[in-house]
Amino acid sequence: MKFLKLVFATALYLALLCSVWLLVVNFFKVNVVFYAAIWTALIAVGLQTALVLFSPLLRGFSGLEKFQQLASCVLIGYIMAISVPTVIDRSLSFYILEKLQQRGGGIQLSRFNQVFTTEYMREHRLVDIRLTEQTESGTIVIQGDCVKLTPKGERIASFGRFFRQNLLPKQRLLMGEYTDQLTNPFRRSDPAPDYLCR
């Protein structure tokens, strides 16, 4: 009986999570999808907490069991925030599938560079959305025509470079070949670009 009550409580949390998300996406301004999804999960946990504490939802459960149920809701909310709206919003893989569908189910392999550089960047306003996310996250500032890292951005970039170089696969399959190119993608960068801030 307790197990069924826990399953019901978790299903109720998922219903709350979806309901709050529908309210957020339809009636509120969203700066960053990931942050909105996290706030949605926290609001749903707050509502779930009220139900657990002040309703007969989990009557007969110990304080520890109620805490565990709420902790599982926090984890479910975080997983959902990352795995659904954030992935769909940011995913190049979803874009490829959607673009193939839009174009009748097939695109010539040799034309994918063109699709990404001329269509993906424009259709998804990729630069605008990523600069907005980083500005809202406090990792960059935009001063006139110059985008600059903040100290927080420096720390995160250093961590990312360290992780990429040391903790990503050294033999990753890319188009039929195993390579370590993505552990240091800057190996292929232009040596002296003309776009630096002066």
Image (cartoon, rainbow, N blue to C red):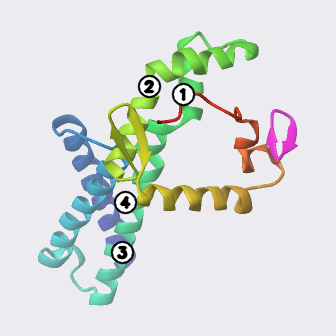
Q: Compare marks 4 and 2 and give the one earlier in the sequence.
A: 4
Tell me which residue sits at (59%, 21%) in the image.
Answer: 116
Residue located beneath label 4 in the image = 77
Residue 111, relative to residue 43: is it above or below?
above
Residue located beneath label 1 in the image = 95
Cα distance between the residues tagged 4 and 2:
26 Å
Write the start and end of the magenta stretch as one range.
172-179
Cα distance between the residues tagged 3 and 2:
35 Å
Q: Residue furthest right?
A: 177
Is any atom of residue 172 visible in this view?
yes
Q: Position of residue 184 (x, y in %)?
A: 73, 48
Residue 71, relative to residue 27: is it above or below?
below
Do the numbered discs 3 and 2 sit on residues whose CB atoms are within 8 Å? no
Cα distance between the residues tagged 4 and 3:
10 Å
Badge 1: residue crowd in 10 Å (few <14, some 14–19, many ≥20):
some
For badge 3, the amino acid type reads: Ala
For badge 2, the amino acid type reads: His
Q: Position of residue 5 (x, y in %)?
A: 31, 72
Do the numbered discs 2 and 1 sit on residues whose CB atoms are within 8 Å? yes
For badge 4, the amino acid type reads: Gly
Q: Which mark is residue 124?
A: 2
Q: Compare marks 3 and 2 and give the one earlier in the sequence.
A: 3
Q: Is residue 57 left or right of residue 104?
A: left
Q: Compare marks 2 and 1 and give the one earlier in the sequence.
A: 1
For badge 1, the amino acid type reads: Tyr
Cα distance between the residues tagged 1 and 3:
33 Å
Q: Position of residue 166 (x, y in %)?
A: 73, 62
Residue located beneath label 3 in the image = 71
Quarter occupied by residue 123: top left
